[in-house]
Image (cartoon, rainbow, N blue to C red):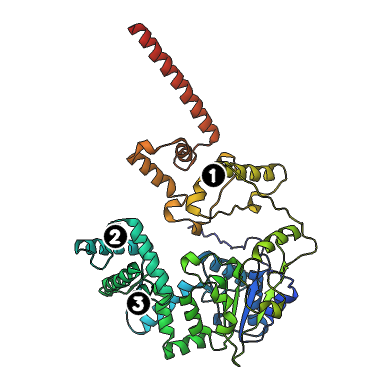
Amino acid sequence: MSGQNYRLVRRGGVGRRAAPVLDEHQRAVVEHDSGPLLVLAGPGTGKTTTIVETVVDRVERRGVDPERVLVLTFSRKAAGELRERITARMRRTTRTPLALTFHSYAYALLRREAVLAGEPPPRLLTGPEQLLEIRRLLHGELEDGARHWPPDMRELLKTRGFAEELRDLLSRAAERGLYGDALVQLGREHGRPDWEAAGLFSYRYQDRFDLDPVPALDYSELIREAAGLLADGEVRRRERDAYDLVLVDEYQDTDPAQEFLLRQLAGDGRDLIAVGDPDQSIYGFRGADVQGILRFPERFPARDGQDAPVVALRVCRRSGPALLEASRRVAGRLPAVPGHENRTGGHRDLIPVGDADPGEVKVLLADSASQEAAVVADTLRRAHLLDGVPWSCMAVLVRSAVRHVPLLRRALVTAGVPVVVAGDELPLVQEPGVRPLITLLRIAAAPSTLDVATAEELLTGPLGGTDMIGVRRLRRALRIAEHEAIAAEAAAAEEAG
């Protein structure tokens, strides 16, 4: 040890982050007195800033202990960003995280109650573990004749795809409180013998984990178990006494199980601020129910029984008039909050800031997915080279990370456009560090599947370590070698003749 002293310095300076200038709608949220409140926040209206300033106001102006404020959101990345912004704004840290995902809160609650009861904390099942158990149980049912399954489905029980579909069905049913008999009954009412069989299977699946000495829960069961704990009067009283304010970000993505958990934690007119936009509800395939935000005012009434008030953020700082007009035409065809327009003027009637660039909307039609990817890459490259737009100010949205990202990534890399894909948008096998190895192993097992696009991806990836110039040189060398081989074969044939 040299005995040197080191001083840690916050990047960008240690000064406190300046308070932002809020518009009248944001101030109405920050200054909300008490009780439930629904905040409708369209794109670019300062939703996160409003959440941060609401927490800061409660802590610094009203004297609320920051440990008694809970912010719930739907991804670890969003929770981390909220924690950083809140602590930077207050220039202080907290003993416990201010922002958590629903699943993190549920697990912390279950773990704490297990410790208090002297029991082992639950173990969280990963997706692959859950799928492996389902496939193992289905294999056992096949050996027993699969009596509970419709005859025309028995061959499907052998496939991985069916196991994945069954797992998703059980998760979606659990989020809506449909377990065992309830799912069987629903199948009988709608003439769906496959639902009946899935309901019976859920008992065998659950019995398997009930044998474990340590409770094992998947993500949907995690929320259900936590909500069940909160239904107990003593636990509910203890949890409610722990928080003076609960905020929920991206409320349009809640499912019925999460709404039930929230009602136990912060219902009955308590201080609850839910922020979201029904027009951005896109996770229905994961169980999200847009009715949660559409019906929030009546499902979370104030202490006097009146519907919770609604505030809409109206000033858009992200888009100019042209972009807003285009996006509002699309949003106008989506479901709205009943009665909301009469109370707040409509959360879709966004106002651009005075000096906003009008923006521009273009629609381009491509003949194929490859051509579409090439057009996107060319557009981004031109914007950077000709217009000076920084790479960090560009984004590409896709409908399916699995189907569209690989092709788009190749086109962007070929055009010299740097690519970063959010980690939580890709399954593990598509992660940048995993995908090249999986692809290489797949090609090694079946060499006939190697094509030009895959070869380029491997060569320009972390395993190949080359760039497109190296690929062009390799192509040229291969063409020369091919021509020389053809010439040699022709010469040999001529001599033989």
Residue 123: x and y in percent read 35, 71
The residue pinned by badge 2 equals 152
Residue 155: x and y in percent read 27, 57
Choose the circle earlier in sequence order: 1 or 2: 2
The reply, left or right, for residue 264 in relation to residue 306 is: left
Q: CA distance from mark 1 to mark 2?
A: 36 Å
Name the residue rendered at 54%, 42% in the picture.
Answer: 370
Using the image as rendered, state which of residue 20 and residue 46 is in the foreground.
46
Does residue 90 appear anywhere in the picture?
Answer: no
Q: Is residue 115 above or below residue 284?
A: below
Q: CA distance from mark 3 to mark 2?
A: 21 Å
Choose the circle earlier in sequence order: 3 or 2: 2
The residue pinned by badge 1 equals 369
Judged from the image, the secondary structure of the residue bearing numbered disc 2 is helix
The amino acid on which the numbered mark 3 sits, given as a three-letter code, is Gln
Q: Are marks 1 and 2 in contact (CB under 8 Å)?
A: no
Residue that protrudes farthest toward the right in the picture = 354
The residue pinned by badge 3 equals 185
Q: CA distance from mark 3 to mark 1?
A: 44 Å
- Nearest to the eye among marks 1 and 2: give it: 2
